[in-house]
Image (cartoon, helix red, strand yellow):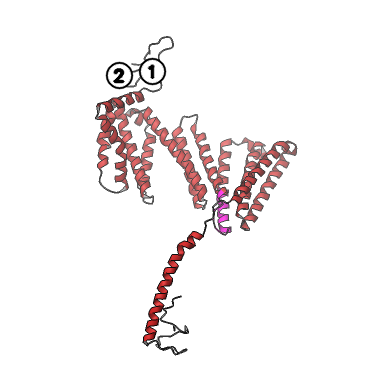
Amino acid sequence: MAYADPTVCPDCRARLDGARVCARCGLDLRTAEAGRLWNQLLRVDRDLERARRASRPQTVAATTPRAPVSVGTVLLALGALALLVAGAIFITVYWGPMGILGRALVLLAATAVAGGVATVVTRRRLRASAEALWTVFLGLFTLDWFAARDQGLLGLDALPGAPWDLLWCAVVVLTTAAIVRFGRRTLDDARELVVVSVLGGLAGAAAGVRVAVVLDDGGARPFWSATAALVVAVLVGAALHWATARVGAWVALAAGGVAALVAVVLALVDAVAHPALVDLVGGAHGVPLAIIAGVAAGLASFGRLPAPARTVSAGAALSTLTLLAALPAWSAAPQYGALLVLAAVAVPAVWVPGRGPWARGARAAGIAPSLLVTLALFPWGAQLLAVVGEALTTTGGQCSPTPVRRRCCWPAASSPVPSCSGP
């Protein structure tokens, strides 16, 4: 409410409807006294506005935000974990005499009761109890899932283990997403059920690891296995984010970040171990780095990403392409060939003009090669780089693959003198 309101009488607050004399109390607003009163009312309104602004920081400070996970939630979650442990002990001790049908009925009944009670307490807006009981439900469901295959119910023991595990991960992710959405619609504060959301993210991470183990094939395809784990984690993270299970989405994406780091390291190791052009191209040892460069370039060109992320992606793409160009030169002329490529490609990138993500990424990608080239200009720096290059070209207990300064690593068992094989 404003005290200086030209539509109402300042005395009786009756509506004026454009009149200069109040029809109810007869106050004449044309007098000098009424003009002075109007100015005073304007000052009162301004003072009240300043008082409101001064009171807002105190109101915010007096409001203490509630923690996303309360002490009661933690205690109930620990109680749920204890209940699951007790259930596992019961199954271990009394499982045998009950028979397959009795075991199935006990597990299904316990799971149904846990799910029903969890639904009731969620509708009653009891957050801590809902977190604990949904955790019990998911734990009992997991016991049901793997016990059914272990006991051969409905012939499930004939199924391979990997598809059964991956199907469990998919069902858990979908179930946790549905529970989190149900909790957001039902609970008063509309916050997600954090423990349930985290369980969904962990199931997505487990699915990525299981896919990597299946595709690894005894270590023959480590890069592609890590890439598959990354794809699975990203898909699960996107699905959980769409289902408003944002904490679980971050857990799944964190697992995807670990898989991405592993994939990059494996690609670098493979390319450095086979630096010759015929190996990088013909032997496909440079394909992983080329894929990484392409993905990084795509992320750098994706306009919806924040500017820092696009800059980092552009720098990663340019650094990877520079490395792919330097490795064959390093293989043909150790130490110095790579430096020439770095000087020709990466050093000028430091002076690239512009303020876009690609220009900033180019400047960032050119810093390290520029330092290496600058180091090589000094005699002691060139010697240091030569020693490092020799150490890298002599790997695996074998002689250097190049005819320049052939060196051997291990002496024969019968002679203290190192021996060398090959042309």
Marks 2 and 1, how far apart in space? 13 Å
Q: Secondary structure at mark 2?
A: loop
* Quadrant of residue 358 within the rendered picture: top left
Query: Picture coordinates of residue 54 (x, y %)?
Result: 44, 65
In terms of depth relative to the viewer, which is nearer, 213 or 3? Answer: 3
Would residue 182 be counted in the magenta stretch?
yes
How would you classify the magenta stretch by its main secondary structure? helix
Asked if residue 50 can be seen in this view, the reply is yes
Identified at 36% across, 37% down, the residue is 290
Q: Secondary structure at mark 1?
A: loop
In the drawing, what numbered circle is on residue 409? Answer: 1
Identified at 61% across, 57% down, the residue is 125
Region in magenta: 174-194
| Vertical position of residue 89 compared to residue 376: above or below | below
For the residue marked with disc 2, what is the amino acid? Arg
In the drawing, what numbered circle is on residue 405? Answer: 2
In terms of depth relative to the viewer, which is nearer, 194 or 101? Answer: 194
- Of all residues, the one furthest to the right in this rendering is 97
Quarter the C terminus occupies? top left
* Quadrant of residue 257 within the rendered picture: top left
Q: Is residue 367 left or right of residue 75?
A: left
Query: Picture coordinates of residue 127 (x, y %)?
Result: 60, 54
Q: Residues within 10 Å of mark 2 (few under 14, many from 20)?
A: few
